[in-house]
Every structure is written in structure tokens, then in C-alpha cells.
Amino acid sequence: MTSDVVTDREQRIRRALQHLRDETTDQVDDVVRFEATEFTDPDIAARERDLVFGAVPTIVAHSSELARTYDFKNVRLPRNQVLLTRQRDGGVKAFVNLCRHRGALLEDEACGKRRLFSCPYHRWSYDIDGSLRTITRGTTVGDLDPSGLGLIELPCEERHGFVWVVDRAGAQIDVAAWLGPQMDAILAGYGLEGLLCVRSESFAEPVNWKVMQDAFLDGYHIQYAHPNTAGKVIHTNVMAFEDLGDHCRFVAPRKSIDRWLEEDPGDRSLVDYVTETHWVGPNSTLLKQPDHFQLLTFRPHHQSPTHSVMEMRLIVPSAEAAGMDDAHWSRLWEKNWQILLDVLHSEDFPILRRSQEGLGSRSAGTMVLGRNEVANHLFRRTIQRLVAGRAESDEV
């Protein structure tokens, strides 16, 4: 981490501390009104699948989830069922999980290790590089060129400890270009490729993916939705925000920072007194905690506008790097993970399910994003730009 980045972070934390003293927060210029149909309309959902997820890179795994050659992971993306595979040369490839013979699902295990993928229907088999390896009873099938019947490959790139995919065959992928120089440098500075994804889980919910993502960019609800959990730890409606184009980051002060409300902290670091949130567009929230990261990813259902999948990952240093014995390390992160699960299932998900029910009202009327909901404004702006097919330079 360069000294400039560290200094910049400390300045942002001090801006958040001043907001806390003044009972203010960062704001956008005006409120924005929106319609419930943004979260229920099947045509809007279809355009998002094609023009957002079929156009820009999204995070689909941490590199440690595919740690060794022949490791694979099965992922349902908005447009395709996808197999991620660690190649013999150390790279990662992504393929549509579909046999090119009759369209059977090639692999139904969530993850594992395969030297080849063998179709359960007629036993056609494929190498981990996607090439067609075996046509069973080939002399009776007919004259086929195996080189044209390999698995369909999707654009895939490994960068900053994550595996990224554009969910459309034939598309181009350039993660650095999508992130832009600022977010690319921020992620590079965290050394995420040297950490481990110690726990991960997917949750299928009857909630539009944007409702889900919005909730994890919102610092306004903490006191009210999480009074006995996060509300005891993090201040509500206080944010020091940075607009990074199609991405953002913001600092939210923890209540432990209150000791500095009346006292000047001087040059000391205040990093341990905040949670730093990064929205990595179009659908991931990366939370930097003092000793670990949490990655929250939100994807639309492949058909329904009112359903989505959330993935949560706990990304931590190894026991050796943390200076812990294995037993202590395991207990620490298991306890941390259980706290996250409890909050999701008892607080976040019930509220969001009911929100989606409310949005289904035929006479919902217009609703409002407040000036204080800064990250939510940027999220909405980015998705609308992508769906409209506009370049960022076209924005006023």
C-alpha cells in the first residue's frame, strides 16, 4: 500500500469524523424519483441481463476457490450456466455448462476436481480446456469435426484475486478498463490474491437483484433495520463518499471512533475505527474490515425479475499470516461467519422480501432516493447507463 493511498484514506476518515461532529453526511445535488416497475418489469430485467451482465465483467469467484489445477466451480449466471476451471497452465477458463451433443447439463456438482467432464446422457467427454475429447460409439454417430464441438467459452480474466466473467460468448473482457485507473489501483493495493476465501454461500431470494444490492450500499437504514447488531457498532447516515465513475467507495464510522469527537486524533491512524465499503460495479459490494474482507455479490435470476441470487464470501489471511494456530483461526472465522448469517436471515432478508412484495402493488406510485443515499444514486446511474447503451463520456 503506497503512502499516498494511506494518506488519502486517513483524510476520508477525518471527513467522516467531521460529519459525525456536525451531524451531516455527503449528499448528491437532488432527490431522484423512480417507479416500482424498475424492480418488477420482465422487459427491464431482460435488458439488464443482456446489456449489463452480458457486456461488462463481474466477479464470479475468489481465486482461492479454484486453487489447484483441475479445480472447477459451477455458477448460475444471469444468461448462462457456467463452469469455471483451473487450467494446466495456471489460468482460469469459463465455459457454458452444456454438452454440445444434445444439450444436457454437463456437470451438476457445485464444485470439485475434474480431469475431464463427462456428459451423463451419452458420455461425450470434454477436456478441462473445453475441447471435445470423446464421442462415444463415434462410428455410428456420423461424420463430425470435434474441433467445432468444444464447449462454448465465455470471456474470463483473473485479476486482483478474483475471477471475472462477461456473461456472453464472443464478448471482449478487459477488467482494468472496466474498473478504471482508480478502482483498479485500490483493489491492487489490498493484496486480495494473497488471501483465502474461507467461507462462501449462495442465497436464492424472491427479491429483485437491485433491491438486494441497494440495501448493501445504504448507510441510512442501519439504526432502524439492525438495532441490536450493526446498529450498535456503526453510525447511521454518516458517509464520506468517493465517486469513481462506474464504481465508488465510502467510509462509515464505527461507534468506537466516538472517543475522537472531542479530542484531536493528531497523526494517528483511524483505520480501525471505520468500515470501508467499495461498490465494484455492476453488482458487488466489497467491505474492508480491519482484519478481513467480505464480498457480497448480487445477480438477477435468469428468468424472473422478482428473484435473485446473493453470494457472500469471507476473505481472510491464512492462519500463518495472521499468526494464529489453526484451531483458533477456524473458530474465529466460523464465529464471524455465523454472525453474518444471523444478520442476513433475521434482519436483511425479511425486510427485503417484504419490500419486493410491496413493489408488486399495481398502484405503487413514484418513490424517492434521498440526497443522503449517495451510493444508491451512483448504482442506479451506472445500471441505467449500461441498459441505455451509453458510454460514460456521454453522461452529463
Image (spheres, rainbow, N blue to C red):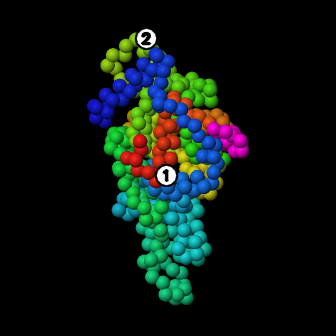
Q: Position of residue 58 (x, y in %)?
A: 46, 51
Q: Quadrant of residue 4?
A: top left
23 above or below 339? above
Residue extending farthest to the right is 362
The residue closer to the viewer here, 203 or 48, is 48
Residue extending farthest to the left is 3
Which residue range is magenta in the image? 352-366
Residue at the spot of label 2:
262
What's under tag 1, amino acid-wise? Ala
Mark 2 vs 1, N-terminal side = 2
Q: Quadrant of the N terminus?
A: top left
The residue closer to the viewer here, 339 or 27, is 27
Is residue 193 rendered to the left or right of residue 381?
left
Q: Secondary structure at mark 2?
A: loop
243 above or below 271? below
Q: Secondary structure at mark 1?
A: helix
Residue 321 bears which disc, if any? none
Count the numbered circles shown: 2
Residue at the spot of label 1:
388
Residue 147 among magenta residues: no
The answer to whether residue 31 shows anywhere in this view is yes
Q: Position of residue 32 (x, y in %)?
A: 54, 36
Residue extending farthest to the top is 262
Q: Position of residue 143 (x, y in %)?
A: 49, 87
